Image: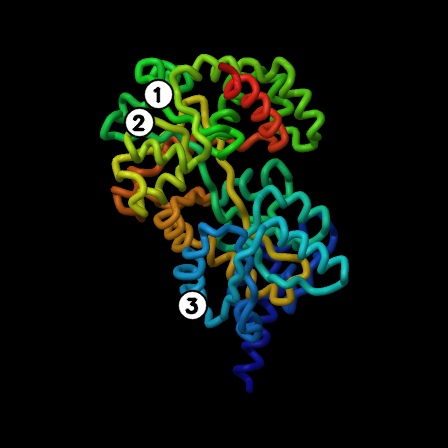
Amino acid sequence: MRFLSMSILAAASLLASPVMAVEPVGAPDFNIKATVDLRAVSVENFEKVLLPVAKTQGSFVFYDFTESFTPLFVDNIIPRFEKKYGIKVTYRSVNGEQAIQQLVAAKQAGQPSPVDAFFMPNGQARLGTESGIIANLPLNTMLPSAQDLNQLASTVSRGFKHGGTVVPFHRNQTAIGYDTRFVSAEQAPKSLPELLAFAKANPKKVAITNPTRGGSGQGILESAILAMSTKECLARAYDYTLTAADAAAWAAGPCLNPALDYFKALKPFVEFTNGNTDTLTLIANGQATVGTTWEDQTLDFIGRGLLPPTVRSRLLTEGQVGDGDGVMIPAGSQKVEAALLFVDFILSDEIQLLKLSLNGSRSARTKLDIAGALKPELVERLVPADQYASLTRPRIVGVLTSEAGKRFVTEILQMP
C-alpha cells in the first residue's frame, strides 16, 4: 500500500511538472475533452501519462484519405503500433472532402466525432479549423517525435496558418526525372534555361505534364512563375485570401507573361502529356528521356517495375514546388489519449524512414539520417539531399494555379 501511495504521489508530481506544458492553439481553452489533464502533458512524460488511459480505451478509429497509403498503414504501420502498445486501430479509407463534411455535420448535430485521428488533405485545413472540427492541440510541440519538424510545414497547410494543429505526416516533391540509360547526371537539365536548351537539342524527348491534368505539370508551371515573376507579382502567389476572381485577374494580366513566354518557346520541342502517369509511361518506354515528375510516384513506379531502375530525380536550381498532407485529431474525438500515441508513433524515426523507403514519401522531420538508414540504391533514386534541403519551394495559391492553368491551355496547348 505504501508503494502504491508513493507511485501515485510520483505520478501526481510528474503531471504537475510545468516543463513544456501544453497550451491550446489560438484560444484560452482546449476545444477537446480528454481523460488526462492536457496542460500537464509534456514531451518528457508523454507516454507515461497517456498510455495507461489509452490501454483502457483499447481501440480507436483512424481515417486515411489516400488510397496509395492503404498498404503502408494496413500492412506495416498499424500492425507495428498494435504490437507495441496493445491498442487496436480501426482503419477506414475515406474521401477527404466528404470526411470533413461528415465531421462538420457531427459537430453541428452535437454528436461525437466518428474518428479519432485523421490523415487529411492539406487543402482542407482551413475549413476544418474554421468549422471547429480540428482539436486545438499544439501537436507540433507536444509530440516527442515532432521536435525537429520543419517549422513552416508543421504550422502551415497550403498557405493556411493553423499553428501546429495538423502535423505533416507526408511530404511530396515535384521534380525533373531523367533516365540515365540515355542522359547522364551531368547532361540532365539543371535549370529552366537548360531544360529549354536540352529540349531544342533533343526534340520530343522531354515530356511535360499538362498542368490541368497532373500535379507535376502544375509544379513546373508554379516553379516557372516563382522563378520568372516580379516581386510585386509574387506578393499574390502566397496570398491565401485570394478569391477566384482575384486569381483570374492576376492570371489574365502581365504577371503570368514571363512564364507563358517560356513555355511558348518550349512547346515545339516537347511532348505535353495528359497526366503524371502518362509522362512516366513515356519515360518507361524510352520515348522521353526527361520529364516532369513527382519524386514519390517515380520511386513507387520503380519499385513496382513500371519504370526502369535507371531513372533519377533532381530539382532545378530555380527551385521546384512541393507539398504534403498532415494528421489531426478531431475536436470530437472520444479517445484522445490513444490517438495522440498513434500520431506520435507515425512521426517516429522508424515509421518516417519506412514510409520513405516504401512510398518515396518525404518527411518534414529535419534530423532523420536518410542516407544512413536506407539502402544506397534507394537513396540514389531520391532527389539528392542537398537539393531537397535548399531548392524545395511551397506550393502557391491553388486558385492562382487553376487560373494560370486555364490560360496555359488557351495560349499554349490550343494554339497551333
Residue at figure coordinates x 27%, y 22% from the top left: 186
Viewport quadrant of the N terminus = bottom right
Disc number placed over residue 289 in the picture, else none: 2
Disc number placed over residue 84 in the picture, else none: 3
State how far apart marks 1 and 2 are (Cα): 9 Å
Q: Earlier in the sequence, mark 1 or mark 2?
A: 1
Q: Earlier in the sequence, mark 2 or mark 3?
A: 3
- Can residue 111 be seen by looking at this rendering? yes
Determine which quarter of the picture holds residue 370: top left
Residue at figure coordinates x 54%, y 32% from the top left: 395
Determine contact: label 1, label 2, CB under 8 Å. Answer: no
Q: Earlier in the sequence, mark 3 or mark 1?
A: 3
For the residue labelled by badge 3, is the local secondary structure a helix, a strand or a loop? Answer: helix
Residue at figure coordinates x 71%, y 52% from the top left: 132
Determine which quarter of the picture holds residue 161: top right
Question: Which residue is at the far bottom?
Answer: 1
- Can residue 23 be seen by looking at this rendering? no
For the residue labelled by badge 1, is the local secondary structure a helix, a strand or a loop? Answer: loop
Query: Which mark is nearer the camera, 2 or 3?
Result: 2
